[in-house]
């Protein structure tokens, strides 16, 4: 089985509501859907959702990286030989985690379909429980967030992830309003997305939020401020999570060495797909850090890949792959009954792709053949 053809489709996904974080606001979400075909007639799907604020990649740049460098590097390879695939990808281009993730996910989808087994089975099997989706809340007015929290409770969500760090001084009011609206019914996690900038500010914010029962605080500091995490660790007992600061294994080494966080948020789009994230989850386990698999607002395709990974690894204790509940329309059909996701026993990703919906959302498309 050899990779013989690729179709790279740039789409634009309509969101049910604007998504607002500390560094940007999104009315819709661009995504690149990669279709890999083999010489024996199998089709595998991958996805790339680049974010210039995190990986330095853009949608159009990712399309070009795939078209001109990465796909030509893997044409003719057996997609089941995932080590060789990544060796060729890394030789072709440095970095480009989101672009490489699309290739990695499509190869795992093909490997599963060739074996007639789900991806989690190829990764060593799955835990019996269902992973969950958290309700991710944008930076909005406190009263609007309180209303959304009540609605989230009625919809069945058990965890709220509140985006903070917008710089308007209302972060504590946001959390206070949400906690008052829902009581202790739902867990609250907060994510500043680098928005608190310096350790002194982050320390004061965390102290102010502690009365409201926060599960953990994600990425309070700038991605490059590794020393700041050490200072913050000395000043608070709150559980800390690194996200944007951890892109590859070398980044993770520093946090294991410093013991400055309790958890790391791994994302397929940051690190290049299932394969490197599985290795990093083991690396984190050996270093005493728990792992969450996070979201860049991917469709059912890459979200399913993340859930397969999470189910297969004992050190992955949380999933926040929220894309499928954020879109008004998307081409995949990941099954869920809130707050649980039902990852089935179908081969590969176990997700069907509606080609008509994909066509309706398409901005551009190109093909690469052997």
Image (cartoon, helix red, strand yellow):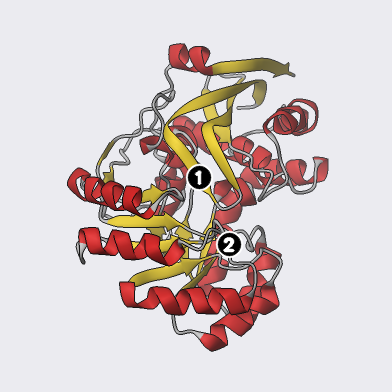
Q: Position of residue 328 (x, y in %)?
A: 39, 26
Tell me the element at label 1.
strand
Task: Give the total of numbered labels.
Answer: 2
Q: Distance between the residues labelled 2 and 1?
A: 29 Å
The residue at 23%/58% (across/down) is: 181
Q: Image quadrant of residue 357? A: top left
Q: Choose mark 2 or mark 1, whichever is in front.
A: 1
Tell me the element at label 2.
helix
Q: Which of marks 2 and 1 is nearer the N terminus?
A: 1
Q: Position of residue 35 (x, y in %)?
A: 58, 23
Q: Say left or right for 218 vs 98.
A: left
The residue at 36%/63% (across/down) is: 175
The residue at 30%/38% (across/down) is: 344
Q: Name the residue under label 2.
A: 280
The C terminus lies in which quarter of the figure?
A: top right
**Camera-side residue of 291 and 173:** 173
Residue projecting furthest to the bottom: 234
- Is residue 99 positioned above or below 174 on the image? above
The N terminus lies in which quarter of the figure?
A: top right
**Camera-side residue of 246 and 326:** 326
Q: What is the crowding at mark 1: few (fewer than 14 residues within 10 Å), some, or many (at least 20)?
A: some
Q: Mark 1 points at which residue?
A: 20
Q: What is the crowding at mark 2: few (fewer than 14 residues within 10 Å), some, or many (at least 20)?
A: many
């Amino acid at each position: 089985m050899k990779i013989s053809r690729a179709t790279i489709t740039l789409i634009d996904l309509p969101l049910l509501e604007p998504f607002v974080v500390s560094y940007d606001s999104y009315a819709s979400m661009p995504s690149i859907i990669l279709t890999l075909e083999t010489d024996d007639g199998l089709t595998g799907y991958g996805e790339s959702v680049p974010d210039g604020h995190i990986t330095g990649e853009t949608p159009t740049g990712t399309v070009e990286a795939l078209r001109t460098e990465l796909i030509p590097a893997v044409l003719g390879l057996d997609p089941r030989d995932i080590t060789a695939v990544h060796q060729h990808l890394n030789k072709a281009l440095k970095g480009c985690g989101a672009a490489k993730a699309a290739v990695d996910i499509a190869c795992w989808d093909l490997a599963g379909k060739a074996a007639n087994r789900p991806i989690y089975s190829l990764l060593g099997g799955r835990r019996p429980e269902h992973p969950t989706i958290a309700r991710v809340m944008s930076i909005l007015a406190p009263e609007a967030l309180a209303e959304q929290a009540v609605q989230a409770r009625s919809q069945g969500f058990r965890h709220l992830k509140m985006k903070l760090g917008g710089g308007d001084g209302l972060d504590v009011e946001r959390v206070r309003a949400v906690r008052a609206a829902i009581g202790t019914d739902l867990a609250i996690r907060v994510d500043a997305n680098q928005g608190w900038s310096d350790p002194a500010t982050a320390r004061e914010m965390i102290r102010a939020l502690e009365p409201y029962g926060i599960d953990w605080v994600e990425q309070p500091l700038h991605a490059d401020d590794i020393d700041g995490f050490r200072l913050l660790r000395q000043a608070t007992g709150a559980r800390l999570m690194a996200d944007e600061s951890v892109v590859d294994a070398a980044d993770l080494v520093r946090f294991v060495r410093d013991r400055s966080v309790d958890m790391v948020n791994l994302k397929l789009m940051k690190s290049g797909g299932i394969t490197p994230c599985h290795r990093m989850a083991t690396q984190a386990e050996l270093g005493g850090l728990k792992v969450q698999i996070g979201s860049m607002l991917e469709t059912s395709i890459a979200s399913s890949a993340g859930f397969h990974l999470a189910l297969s690894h004992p050190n992955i204790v949380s999933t926040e792959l929220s894309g499928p509940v954020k879109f008004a329309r998307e081409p995949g059909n990941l099954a869920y009954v809130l707050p649980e996701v039902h990852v089935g026993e179908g081969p590969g990703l176990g997700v069907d792709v509606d080609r008509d919906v994909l066509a309706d959302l398409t901005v551009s498309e190109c093909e690469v053949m052997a």
